[in-house]
Amino acid sequence: MEHIYLDWAATALPDQKLLNEALESSLKSFANPSSPHKSGREASAIVGQQRKILAGCFGTDPRQLIFTSGGTESNNMVVFSLLKKKRKGNIIISGIEHPSIYEPAASLEKFGWKVRIVNPEPSSIVDPEKMASMIDEETRMVLLIMVNNETGAIQPVNEIGKLIQKSAAGQNIHFHIDAVQAAGKIPLNLGALPVHSASISSHKFQGPRGCGLLYLKKPLEMLYAGGGQEGGLRHGTENTFGMIGTALAAAANTAAIDDNINHALGLKKILIDRISKIKGSLFIPRCSTEELLNPIMFSPYILLASLPPVPGEILVRVMSDRGFEIGTGSACATGKKKKSRIMDAIGIKTHESFSAVRISTGPKTDMEEIHRFCDTLEKESTILINSLKR
Amino acid sequence: MDKLYLIKIGEIALKGNNKSFFEKKLKKNIKMSLKGIQCTVFGGRGRFFIEAPKESSRVVEQVLSNTFGITGYSEVSRIEKDIDLIIGEAIKLAERNIAEGIGLNFKVNSRRSDKGFAMSSYEICCAVADAVLDRIPGLKVDVHNPDWAINVEIRETAFVYGRVDKGPGGLPVGCAGGGMLLLSGGIDSPVAGYLMAKRGLSIDAIYFHTYPYTSDEARQKVIDLAGILAKYTMGINLYIIPFTEAQLRIKEKGLEKAGTLLMRNAMVRIADRIAKGKNDLALVTGEALSQVASQTPESIRYTGSATDLPIFRPLIGMDKQEIINISKAIGAYRTSILPFDDCCTLFAPEHPITHPDFERMKEEFDKLDIEELLIKAADNAEKIHLSGVYT
């Protein structure tokens, strides 16, 4: 049976060659980088090299990069750093944040913080003015997902960052971006962006699972204490394998980023052309083809399609049984058509979000696979749509 | 070394001429659950014994705790009918109880079915209690509220035992014939199957799978539930029905607001066909009155009309919490609440009928022209056997 993987936004297909290389290097430099002996110093130098490589990839100073276990930890670290602040206030997030921002933010409310949520426009892109208008003297932090994991919408981070700086309380506001779906996929020059911190996850760009980065323009006071690794901001013996793998994957993907984007846009165009021919199909958000294919507005790697009345979950199941792996937009819950929080935030009708499936590609996806996927999707969705007609 | 257990039976002991039928069934069931373990089950006339290797005691005790027809069991010492030996065992038992710290007040129970034994029951009790009191200072006899008891039985040989653990009661599975349980992945139906097995019904189960609208995880969940239930029912044959075509026909041609009722009626028809094919005497469902729209008296009348077999609904008068308590006690709850539900939203009406008109429903069902599809679904059932053997 076929096995075509189109769920790269969930996790990228690992690059085996690169991971083997990382494993081999990490086994050579096996020592604890904090150990003062020769092997330890060598391992420490290796860690330093990886940080430099990654700083080059993301336009930062090496000292501004903290290795973490991934995007979720990086996001949590930033949100919960607020608990160290003496004066409570409010934070602003968008309505389409990943759970690793949304959930910690929600739990901050239990500690007396206020969370303000700004919903994006129907395009799932946040209006910078609208976000900036939520800022007041009590605002301590603004958090925003740079590339949304469901719709692929790219947020105007630059514009929002500048508006924050311009606001009366701007100097005291920390602006954090969740760059998990951006890093290694679209240009990401963190040093040039008006942000104070950013989260990156290695496995989204073919690096190893369990490793990520937190970019911190200036150190933040964190909750944890320990052995003092990572500049005293993230403690625990360094994951040398993860760090080397992350650097290798970031370097490889950054070098190929323009080609990868063009390749992905070509695949996305075919997907849009062919899926739009299936009767009743639509794309979320409801933007024009030109907009969906505009790499400034939407990630070239992500397409959210909906084929009502077929539930997304059913389509994913059927396609999986035919050898094509895609993601769901929202899950079918017990007895209820449960909407996704993100679909809700952009005002998508229940039956449309209920039927959403996410197709996400990567550098290894080829055109032939996309055509075969579309052939099967056309066939199976037609059967399902017809069988569900009354 | 072997351990010997005394098995107490409850309701079976009250049976008249059929008593030996029930007793044989119970013996057979215990042996079947312990297939693969070298053990012997013997006795009769209200008392059974099982002798099994010590290393199998965990499994044996599980079986005795879960086998319907057993009200209690206890590990026993079997000795010669000699009062000194009996006293010796009683003292060992008392010393163990003291070491476990279960209290200082005790009593001695004695039964003597061998009337040839020199001492009466009362004399045995006194002799044993005196000896124990002499040996272990600080103990007190309390015949009304003892912390523990020493039990002595004089039969063809003498038995001494202490704590009696509870069995599940009920009647041996199979003594009431066979029934077909409509098993979903929810909380109720496994409990219904358990309760009917408790009354002696041998249980098989039927599950309606609507792939791709139901996931394989949901199917596996039902298989797992049947596996849990099988340990109480001496095994289960699970029939998995390919129900998609029938379900789609109901969606296509059925009255929208009656969708669930038409579906349940179709399910009962299939269950009826399979049950009769294997000479089952009844259907079993997990319905509880007024729990959902399809469980009002009118709805139950309509869905029940699809079969002439009796439908046993042991949960009919129970609250949800009572059902959940049993589900937890039998170890099904954690599986039942796993989130692999049917994608039923597609087929569940927004506003289902709660008080269907019986004649109107019959007309609506006829419009489906579904009989052939139901026969096909029943005939294409996949049968999976879940073992009731403990390992």
Image (tube, rainbow, N blue to C red):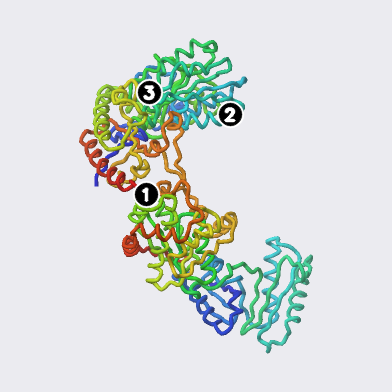
Query: Would residue B246 be visible to someone looking at this image?
Result: yes
Chain where mark 1 sits? B
**Rounded to the nearest whole Å, what is the CA distance between mark 1 and mark 2?**
39 Å
Residues tagged 3 and 2 counted as in contact (Cβ below 8 A): no
In-front residue for pair B321/B273? B273
- Alpha-carbon distance for marks 1 and 3? 34 Å
- At mark 2, the secondary structure is helix
Provide the residue designation for mark 1. B213
Please give the residue where the numbered disc 3 appears in the rendered image: A154
The amino acid marked with disc number 3 is Ile
Within 10 Å of the Cα at label 2, are there few (<14), some (14-19), or many (20+) other Cα atoms?
few
Q: Nearer the viewer, mark 1 or mark 2?
A: 1
Residue A366 position, x and y percent, is 23, 33
Q: Chain of mark 2?
A: A
Looking at the image, which is closer to me, A269 or B50?
Answer: A269
Residue plotted at (60% across, 75% down): B11
Return the disc, 3 or 2, that comes first in the chain's sequence: 2
Asked if residue A281 is positioned above or below residue A64 in the image, the reply reads: below
Kindly identify the amino acid type of the residue bearing the numbered disc 2. Glu
Q: Secondary structure at mark 3?
A: loop
Q: Are marks 1 and 2 in contact (CB under 8 Å)?
A: no
